[in-house]
Image: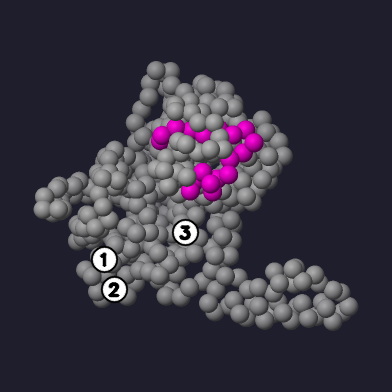
Amino acid sequence: MTLPADKEVSFKESVNLCFDLARATLDIEEGLAQYIRNVNNVYQVRFPVKLNGIIETFIGWRAVHSDHKLPAKGGIRYSPAVNQDEVEALAALMSYKCALVDVPFGGSKGGLLIDPRKYDRDSMEKITRRFAFELIRKDYIGSGTNVPAPDMGTGQREMAWIASTYQSHRPGDIDHLGAVTGKPISMGGIQGRVEATGRGVVLGLREFFRHPEDVKNAQLEGTLEGKKIIVQGLGNVGYHAAKILAEEDGAKIIAIIEFDGALLNPDGLDIEKVYQHKVAMQGVKGFPDAQYFEDGQALLEGECDILIPAAMEGTINQQNAAKVRAKLIAEAANGPVTFAAQAILHERGVVILPDVYLNAGGVVVSYFEWIKNLSHIRFGRMQRRWEEGQNELLLQAIQSSGHRVPEALSRKIHLGAREIDLVRSGLDDTMRIAFQHIRERYWSHPHIESYRTAAMALAIEKISTSYQIMGVYP
């Protein structure tokens, strides 16, 4: 399916057209396919909050795309540009994302029409708590029904306020901490959640580079080491992805694109220094160790091995897709490549690792946090010291046989798994297996031409199976 060169569609339409491409490769009855494709329900709320003696009115949404599994899961976005169509598109992506990586959640998403930069902390708390109350009283928040998490414009702070508000309105719910994920550790959060989406991007790229056939198809070779990477958006996702790629994989982050311009250094940027500068100066302008470009978006067309769009949807579109010189696009954001742009990039042989797979790390670790909250015990508490004891016995056995184990290696072997170790291990396993299934479908199906279509087909297939098992037959 292609569109005319001058035809661009909305984010929601783009998601649905990707669904249609994948649906065409499956043997699913049309009525059931249409049911899966469309959002089940959307709640729009308007509410007043008195701030500094003035009453302001806010509009928010919470959409449930699919409840084939419960609870429905998805972040809450605070943005001056959010709207109902965007929330519905993001909810749909969450359904497909969860199904693809075998996380037993339905898809949901929330949004509040607000510019958080215009309000102080106390005002944001009042607004967030009131928004949470509106969702709670309509059962759009609950550990067994609908579980929000951070998204653009929100973080641990907002999740803590929502969790606290939920507890005050549902005091008898002993699983109240499971009603929200992405919380601070002190409120039942989990180690590794903040970095989860960015680390998931890295783990997905690592798995891609383990398959020479796929790497060659992207006109690349070798590993991530030394690869030249451009990152658009140094928010939570872009920062962690870039930092891990540079520090652990030896990649070169040659450019960072932000809202106030871009930085370029062919020898590689120090991501931590750039990030600290951005936080201190509210932008990247003025960073000393790089060339600054006021028109930052032009660097999306810069020559590199991998381009990581990690900010907004629609970043790569019909206007710039023909000029993109990256060989591999890794979608760290939701919907950064439009449907029209996908067709242009495919014609040019540019490979895309899709958002529905690559940025699933956040919901995977949210799933771990949810499990932790429902089980009322942190990961590793019961087995860590036992593991250390067993490892110590193993080391003693090796040493007593006359073989010396170096001290540094001995310390590593001796340690039992911490919560962060288990979280990262589980995320790595999830991202590896998911890509293996995607590539198997991609290489084996004659009518599937992209990883996105392969991933969407797998997700639709799993959701369809769930509905049929439930008794929703065509």
Q: Position of residue 120 (x, y in %)?
A: 26, 52
* N-term-proximal mark, 3 vs 2: 2
Q: Which residue is mark 2?
A: 173
Q: Nearer the viewer, residue 146 or 303?
A: 303
Specify whether 46 is left or right of 270: left
- Check whether the beta carbons of the residues at disc 2 and disc 1 lie within 8 A of each other: yes
Can residue 28 be seen here? The reply is: no
Residue range in magenta is 259-276
Q: Which residue is mark 1?
A: 166
Residue 130: assigned label: none
Q: Position of residue 410 (x, y in %)?
A: 74, 72
Look at 32% across and 75% down and name the residue there. 174
Q: Is residue 422 above or below residue 255?
A: below
Label 3 packing within 10 angstroms: few (<14), some (14-19), many (20+): many
Q: Which residue is mark 3?
A: 193
What amino acid is found at the position of numbered circle 3 in the picture? Arg
